[in-house]
Image (cartoon, helix red, strand yellow):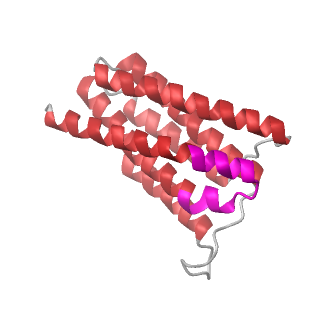
Amino acid sequence: MLQSFTRRLLSILLTLAVPAGLNAQSATPDLSDPEVAHVAVTANSIDIELAKLAQARTSNPDVKRFAATMITDHSAVNAQATALATKLGVTPQDNAVSQSLLKGATEARGAIEPLKGGAFDKAYIDREVAYHQAVLEALDGLLIPTTSNAELKKLLVDVRPAFVAHLEHAKKLQSSLVASK
């Protein structure tokens, strides 16, 4: 399930990035700034909701701390994005990438929700590794390149290191969960 979500997200991003008849070196698609803002807010909101589930379900203190970090950091990014959208008078606009993210999130939650204990922790952290990797690829390959507003682009560039840190943290947790078996 996790691989299918990641494959679907990357497939959508590649489909958007490489339209039919264009090679991989062609320009990325032209998402509007309101669409980019919607993707960013959606991606953060998805991670917040799954982190809340993890906090409620895990008994592993490291996983609980990681989930708390996801809630805090992604909520802060959404607050910055909302403040910027308000300042710019931009209303985030729903789009195919946002819709796919939401569909994948529903599937991911459905797959991990029935799990318990270590199986839940492993599935949650595995999903976080894949999700943060996919979001970084989306930032680098689609969102940052297609954003025309300098302030929105700066926000995306400025928050990128946090996503890198989250990915590295999730990978370390992933390794420790495997090692503790």
Q: In the image, which residues are magenta? A: 140-158
The quarter in which the C terminus is drawn is top left
Residue 56 falls within the magenta-colored stretch: no
Image coordinates for residue 55, horizontal then vertical, percent? 41, 20
The answer to which quarter of the image holds residue 26 is: bottom right
Q: Is residue 84 above or below residue 64?
A: below
Residue 149 falls within the magenta-colored stretch: yes
Image coordinates for residue 11, horizontal then vertical, percent? 51, 62
Which residue: 51% across, 34% down?
A: 47
Image coordinates for residue 16, horizontal then vertical, percent? 62, 65
Which residue: 69% across, 37% down?
A: 81
Q: Is residue 149 visible?
A: yes
The answer to which quarter of the image holds residue 45 is: top right
Q: Is residue 39 above or below residue 72?
A: below
Which residue: 44% across, 57% down?
A: 7
Image coordinates for residue 38, horizontal then vertical, percent? 69, 44
Task: Tell how many labels.
Answer: 0
Front residue of this view, candidates 24 and 152 = 152
Q: Is residue 1 visible?
A: no
Which residue: 34% across, 36% down?
A: 125
The answer to whether residue 90 is left or right of residue 143 is right
Q: Main secondary structure of the magenta part?
A: helix
